[in-house]
């Protein structure tokens, strides 16, 4: 599978898992930092132009990729087998409008549900996935709305087969 196809497949699987999590709404895949919305004008009016007191949105993007080669062969100088492992890092952010201090408790409950959902699902698109990491919690504006924000990261591991010994 080509790298771009794989990225799209993994992002779609992350989106599906997020959407299946209780109380998660409005999940978008980022393409080059720009959320992909089926109806861009609806996205702009809902999140950028509006001053919403009841806003929730999630954005998924690719964060990094790296590769490693592992060679088996013990102490001999000739590798018996060579394997390539690709590590695909993804980041997603959840925004939840700040209304009162009670909204922080509500958002924390959603965050806990997301962590539970992903950490119970150790396979993403058929690839092994690392445990989901909650990297940061903060406050930011989304459009004109002040929001709680949670940044998550996840690594998906791809084993590339069919390589010849080095």
Image: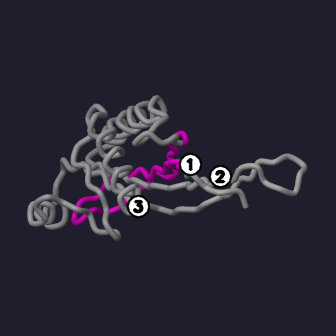
Q: Residues within 10 Å of mark 3 (few under 14, many from 20)?
A: few
The residue that disc 2 covers is 83
For this rendering, which residue is in front, 131 or 161?
Answer: 161
Q: Residue 45's x, y, as percent?
A: 10, 63
Circles 1, 2 touching at the beta carbon (< 8 Å): yes
Q: The residue tagged with tag 3: helix, strand or loop?
A: loop
- Name the foreground residue: 31 vs 153: 31
Q: Residue at x 27, y 62 (%)?
A: 142
Task: Give the alpha-carbon distance from disc 3 to disc 1, as whole Å.
Answer: 14 Å
Mark 1 and mark 2: span between their CA atoms?
Answer: 7 Å
Identity of the residue furthest to the right in this view: 75
Q: Would you say the residues marked 3 and 1 are in contact, meaning their CB atoms lie under 8 Å apart?
A: no
Residue at 56% across, 50% down: 161
Mark 2 surroundings: few (<14), some (14-19) or many (≥20) residues within 10 A: some
Q: Which residues are magenta?
A: 130-159
Classify the position of the C terminus by image quarter: bottom right
| Quadrant in the picture for the N terminus | bottom left
Disc 3: which residue: 2
- Looking at marks 3 and 1 on the same chain, the residue that comes earlier in the sequence is marked by 3
Identity of the residue drawn at 71% across and 50% down: 81
Above or below, comparing residue 57 to residue 20 in the picture: below
Helix or strand or loop: what does disc 1 sit on?
A: strand
Q: Is residue 72 left or right of residue 21?
A: right
**Residue 67 badge:** none
Q: Nearer the viewer, residue 66 or 61?
A: 66
Residue 43 at x, y percent in the picture: 15, 61
State the separation of the CA atoms marked 2 and 3.
18 Å
Instruction: Residue 159: give its label.
Output: 1
Q: Is residue 148 at least partly visible in the picture?
A: no
Kindly indicate the quadrant of the structure image that contains residue 163. bottom right
Against 135, is 22 above or below?
Answer: above
């Amino acid at each position: 599978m080509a790298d771009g196809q794989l990225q799209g497949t993994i992002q779609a699987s992350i989106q599906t898992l997020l959407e299946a999590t209780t109380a998660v709404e409005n999940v978008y895949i980022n393409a080059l930092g720009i959320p992909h919305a089926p109806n861009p004008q609806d996205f702009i009016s809902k999140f950028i132009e509006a001053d919403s007191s009841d806003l929730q949105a999630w954005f998924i993007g690719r964060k990094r990729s790296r590769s490693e080669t592992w060679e088996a062969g013990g102490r001999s100088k000739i590798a018996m087998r060579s394997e390539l492992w690709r590590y695909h890092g993804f980041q997603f952010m959840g925004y939840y409008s700040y209304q009162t201090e009670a909204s922080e408790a509500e958002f924390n409950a959603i965050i806990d549900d997301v962590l539970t959902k992903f950490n119970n699902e150790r396979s993403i698109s058929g690839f092994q996935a690392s445990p989901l990491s909650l990297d940061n919690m903060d406050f930011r504006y989304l459009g004109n709305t002040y929001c709680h924000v949670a940044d998550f990261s996840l690594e998906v591991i791809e084993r590339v087969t069919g390589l010849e010994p080095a």
